[in-house]
Amino acid sequence: MTLARYCLAFVAVAAAAGAFAQEKKPATATRREVAKLDAAAEEKAIRATADAFVKAFNAGDAKALAAMWTAAGDYVGENGETRKGRNAIEKEYEALFAKHLGLKIKLDIESIRLVDASTAVEDGRSTVVADGRTVSQNRYTAIHVKANSHWLLSAVRDMPGAEAAEGGLKELEFFVGDWVARRDEREVRSNCKWAIGNQFLLRTYEVVDPEQHEAPQRTGWQIIGWDPAIRQIRSWSFDSTGGHGQGLWSQVEGGWSIETEGVLADGSPTTSTDLIERVDDNILGWQSIRRTAGGQQLPDTEQVVLERVAASAKTAP
């Protein structure tokens, strides 16, 4: 699962209690109640819960976060996954913080609208940062209910951003071409082109020693496609050592974050977060962080610079 799919926090800003099972009141009564409210004071109270949420999230406090939801609160992510109830939501926060240490969140509230005396609708955007890098951004709608003079979160709906809503691989078209990265007297040469009716991108690479005219030391393939079931870009990778893996792509500020899982030729499982920084149309930065192999933590790699060296055919034969 990707960080974006696990992060309930992307959409949460205040917390939970109350219910929607009340009988519907006449519209005239609802308007009268709203008119009597001090809208500015209620909005201030909801924003205060948002501040408390950010503080608890940045401290990795799953219990405090769950307490901000109603006992029957529910969350639906952009891919349709659902978590119902405060206990289930707390477990998801615990899993998130255990898997990704040091996460920080920022909430940008775009609007808060009072529906009646005990219900408010909030729309906004959230940004999650890890190791000083933006790893995900998202849009959300949150429903707040008021119980015992406190605003709590009853329902949250996570939504894809404008880029994801367009679907497909449009945002990766700039990858098409030939690229080279140089490091430690070796070169990594890669080519990316459209394939299979322009529905996928095919990337091939080889690691070579320019001083030697022998076969490449290592080669590999990567297929990149749009997964309509989860509305996210997915990739599958294979290399000449016998290793293979797959990744889920999330667009972040300045580039892409790829949550990968794979296996080495000896069967050892691997995980990593690969970061691609788009400096401009001809320069990319690549780095792999939070790496593990066989259950052991590995150090982050240094950022590698890839430079475009030639145009590539748009469509594979």
Image: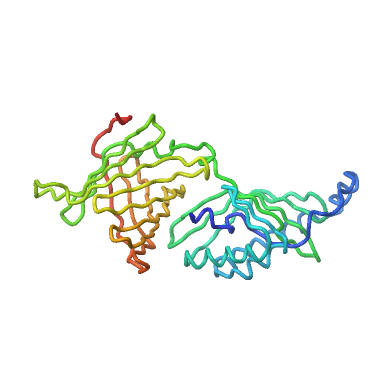
Looking at the image, residue 310 lies above or below residue 53: above
Left or right, 241 with respect to 49, comes to left
Q: Is residue 45 left or right of residue 54?
A: right
Relative to residue 182, is residue 92 drawn left or right? right
Q: Position of residue 292 (x, y in %)?
A: 36, 64
Of residue 139 and residue 4, the one placed in the foreground of this image is 4
Identify the coloring: rainbow
Q: Quadrant of residue 12?
A: bottom right
Q: Residue at x 45, y 44 (%)?
A: 233
**Where residue 86 sits: x, y (%)?**
67, 64
Instruction: Give the number of callouts.
Output: 0
Please give left or right for residue 143 compared with residue 2 in the image.
right
Location of residue 199 in the rendering, given as x and y in whole percent from the top left corner: 41, 33
Q: Quadrant of the C terminus?
A: top left
Relative to 71, is 226 above or below?
above
- Farthest residue, direction front: 267
Tell which of 169 and 107 is nearer to you: 169
Q: Position of residue 74 (x, y in %)?
A: 68, 56
